[in-house]
């Protein structure tokens, strides 16, 4: 076993760290947080330098790197700032479905603009009545000649009011049993007649990222917008989740490390009862526990990413990485606030925002309960979706 990053990976990690630190402007970031504004200018620069879509092949605008390289970028971005990091790492959300299953024409049309900072992508999977259960869908796509007519509602859609196109999971065969065998993914572009996006606000965290409800009313889409084979959409999305859940785990890992960095710095400076906080054993034990959990999470996340790069993604390991890293982010951010005391409750000191942003990593891309179902199914040797 080799537990060292390669020279190329260390270079990517260092480049991501230097870039995001160079873009850090606390007052501007706090303004975006208050106004729920996407960090457009940083996103554009990140695209120009090849950080967005770094794991795409070069012919589609990427750098030809692997999932673990993308994980390193996401971790560094979220470590410096949880809100900016999440917004940047989700700018290409679901475009991997196009990469894995799209035609050559679809890949060039949608992926190249994503990496160039011209398009933001989104995936429309979750529905109001079904939540985590994507095996059951109310959104229907009916084939009429050379078109699909889509009707339904999707909710909690990341980038919903920002995206230039959506990968939409629809029921295309209403007679299929089980029903998920009759689902397809279809690309729907922003501005298509009958498609409306409504921002969901206010919300607890990730204020720089749009979260929206989408309504589809007789949305007419050319059949050429179908991704891959008809009625194979569920399996495409499940495969995509193996990558996206690793990325969310990397977000959580970066948030945990960023919260820890701030707690350690504060403990070294803050005086109480004539001593620095870091000199108290109770503080030392808190920091030791935080650092240990972060390192354990890092090993899980990196291993899950490595398995994806080997072409052998492990749903069990992916779910372990996500559930553990997300819980670590929440608990480390909580302790970071505790170490800061009253200052930790104030937005200016950032750890309260890290805490609010950390929580979403336990919810989106499959709640921690869903992840535990996957782990348990693997332990029992069951195939979840035959």
Image: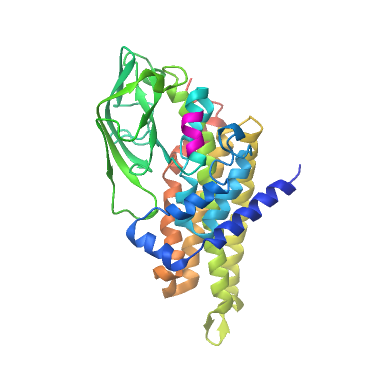
Question: Going by the image, does 119 lie left or right of 20?
Answer: left
User: Can residue 102 be seen here?
Assistant: no
Write down the quadrant of residue 288 in the picture.
bottom right
Say whether residue 110 is magenta: yes
Along the viewing direction, whichever of 212 and 319 lies nearer the viewer = 212
* Residue drawn at (59%, 44%) of the image: 70
* Residue drawn at (26%, 30%) of the image: 193
Q: Position of residue 3 (x, y in %)?
A: 73, 47
Write down the quadrant of residue 221 in the picture.
top left
User: Can residue 37 be seen here?
Assistant: yes
Say whether residue 38 is magenta: no
Q: Position of residue 24 (x, y in %)?
A: 51, 63
Residue 280 position (above or below residue 197): below
* Residue drawn at (50%, 39%) of the image: 244
What's the magenta region? 108-113
Quarter the N terminus occupies = top right
Write down the quadrant of residue 184 in the picture.
top left
Q: Main secondary structure of the magenta part?
A: helix
Along the viewing direction, whichever of 97 and 369 lies nearer the viewer = 97
Residue 280 position (above or below residue 249): below
Name the colouring of the figure.
rainbow
Question: Going by the image, does 181 lie left or right of 272?
Answer: left
Numbered label tally: 0
Q: Position of residue 37 (x, y in %)?
A: 36, 55
Q: Position of residue 142 (x, y in %)?
A: 30, 17
Question: Going by the image, does 15 lie left or right of 93?
Answer: right
Along the viewing direction, whichever of 140 and 114 lies nearer the viewer = 114
Q: Residue furthest right?
A: 1
């Amino acid at each position: 076993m080799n537990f060292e990053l390669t020279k190329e990976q260390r270079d990517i990690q260092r480049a991501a760290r230097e870039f995001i630190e160079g873009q850090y402007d606390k007052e501007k970031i706090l303004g975006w947080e208050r106004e729920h504004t996407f960090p457009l200018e940083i996103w554009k620069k990140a695209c120009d330098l090849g950080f967005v879509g770094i794991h795409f092949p070069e012919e589609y605008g990427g750098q030809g790197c692997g999932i673990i390289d993308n994980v390193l970028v996401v971790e560094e971005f979220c470590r410096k700032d949880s809100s900016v990091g999440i917004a940047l790492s989700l700018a290409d959300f679901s475009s991997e479905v196009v990469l894995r299953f799209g035609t050559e024409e679809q890949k060039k049309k949608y992926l190249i603009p994503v990496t160039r900072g011209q398009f933001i992508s989104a995936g429309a999977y979750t529905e109001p009545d079904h939540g985590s259960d994507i095996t059951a869908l109310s959104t229907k796509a009916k084939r009429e000649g050379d078109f699909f007519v889509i009707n339904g509602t999707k909710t909690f859609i990341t980038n919903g009011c920002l995206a230039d196109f959506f990968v939409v999971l629809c029921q295309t065969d209403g007679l299929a049993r089980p029903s998920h065998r009759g689902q397809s993914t279809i690309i729907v572009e922003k501005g298509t007649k009958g498609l409306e996006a409504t921002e969901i606000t206010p919300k607890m965290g990730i204020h720089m990222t749009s979260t929206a409800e989408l309504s589809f009313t007789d949305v007419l889409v050319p059949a050429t917008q179908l991704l891959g084979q008809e009625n194979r959409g569920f399996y495409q999305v499940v495969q995509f989740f193996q990558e996206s859940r690793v990325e969310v785990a990397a977000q959580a890992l970066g948030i945990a490390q960023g919260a820890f960095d701030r707690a350690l710095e504060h403990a070294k400076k803050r005086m109480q009862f004539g001593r620095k906080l870091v000199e108290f054993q109770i503080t030392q034990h808190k920091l030791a526990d935080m650092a240990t959990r972060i390192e354990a999470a890092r090993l899980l996340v990196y291993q899950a990413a490595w398995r994806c790069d080997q072409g052998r993604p492990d749903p069990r390991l992916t779910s372990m990485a996500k559930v553990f890293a997300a819980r670590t982010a929440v608990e480390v951010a909580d302790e970071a606030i505790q170490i800061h005391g009253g200052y930790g409750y104030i937005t200016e000191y950032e750890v309260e925002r890290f805490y609010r942003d950390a929580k979403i990593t336990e919810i989106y891309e499959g709640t921690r309960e869903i992840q535990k179902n996957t782990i348990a199914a693997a332990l029992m040797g069951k195939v979840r979706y035959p």
